[in-house]
Amino acid sequence: MTKFKAPKLRIREAVAILAFLGPSLAGFLLFFLIPFGAVVYYSFVDSPMQGNFVGLDNYRQLWDSSSFRKAFMNSLLFAATSVPVLFAVSLSLALLLNKAMPLRQTFRTALLLPLVVPVASVVLVWQALFHYNGAFNGLLVNAGLNPIDWMNSRWSFVVMMAVFVWKNTGYNLVLFMAGLANIPAEQHEAASIDGAGTWRHFRSIVWPGLAPVSFFVIIMSIVSSFKVFREAYLVAGAYPHDAIYTLQHFMNNQFYNLDYPKLTSAAVLLALAIGAVVYVLFRAERRFREGME
């Protein structure tokens, strides 16, 4: 009897699994996988209407575009500089707030507020701060210094990095705090008994315990760094200073110009770049885990 019931049970379990996963899978296929497949297809044709296959011509024309090369390099540079800064700031704050200190809950709440504040409201504040006649330039003038055109100079890169770090610190802080809470208290006590200093305690206990969380934080930070377009667009418009002209600006402008071959080709290259970085990080995380074992 058991042999005859086993296949029926498996079928019921499969049906139950599909019933739970079905809506999510349908949404993933409808809103992510199928649209991305269409984007890949359109990147190899001359236009969505005619659909003549042109091979890699769209990618060659895209790379010949100086505006694309500038946007591509700016995006890579922003990710390479902002992600380490965000990681260091988030980890430092997590280590600080994990200890007993005055107003700890108040600081935690203040750091989490950017997660719930709409982007448009955030941008209004940053515009008031970094406008040529804004608050920061007012302080510079009062100090006897010349005002700085923050958003129309190389300083715009620093401003956007500050916005990015401020906006994403709270999310990473939650992850690091959860990772610190999962480190067994016995390990901290053993390190204290052995007389380990602050650096040795961090290197031998805290850092290995935060390795999985750190890997996830880096991945999410890299993805977020390529989505900084909303803040840059609202602060500086569709054609900002060259220092913050990113791939998102380029693709947005190509969409307005209805240049779908360049738009889809740029989207595919952006996905490949992010995928390559994530793959390298996965390999590095695997080697690090094997070295720890």
Image (cartoon, rainbow, N blue to C red):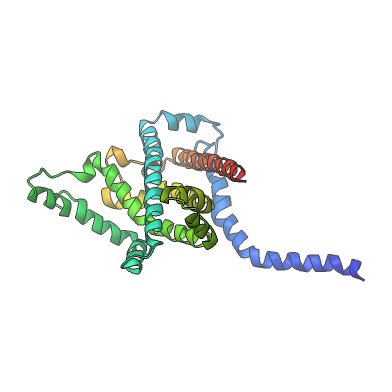
* Image coords of residue 212 (percent x, y): 54, 52
Would you say residue 171 is visible in this rendering?
yes
User: x, y (%) of residue 50?
Assistant: 53, 39
**Residue at horizontal 50 percent and vertical 60 percent from the top:** 189
Q: Is residue 264 above or below residue 120?
A: above
Out of 4 and 66, give the one closest to the viewer: 4
The x, y position of residue 164, in whole percent, is 35, 51
Q: What is the quadrant of the N terminus in the image?
A: bottom right
Say above or below: 143 vs 106. above
List the single residue furthest toward the right. Answer: 1
Q: In this view, does 236 lie to the left or right of 216?
A: left
Q: Is 80 in front, or is 197?
A: 197
Q: How many marks?
A: 0
Q: In this view, does 20 lie to the left or right of 109?
A: right
Q: Which residue is drawn at 20% across and 54% down?
A: 129
The residue sitting at 56% across, 44% down in the picture is: 285
Q: In this view, does 188 lie to the left or right of 160?
A: right
Can residue 252 be seen here? The reply is no
Q: Is residue 79 left or right of residue 287?
A: left
Percent coordinates x, y for residue 93 in the rendering: 37, 56
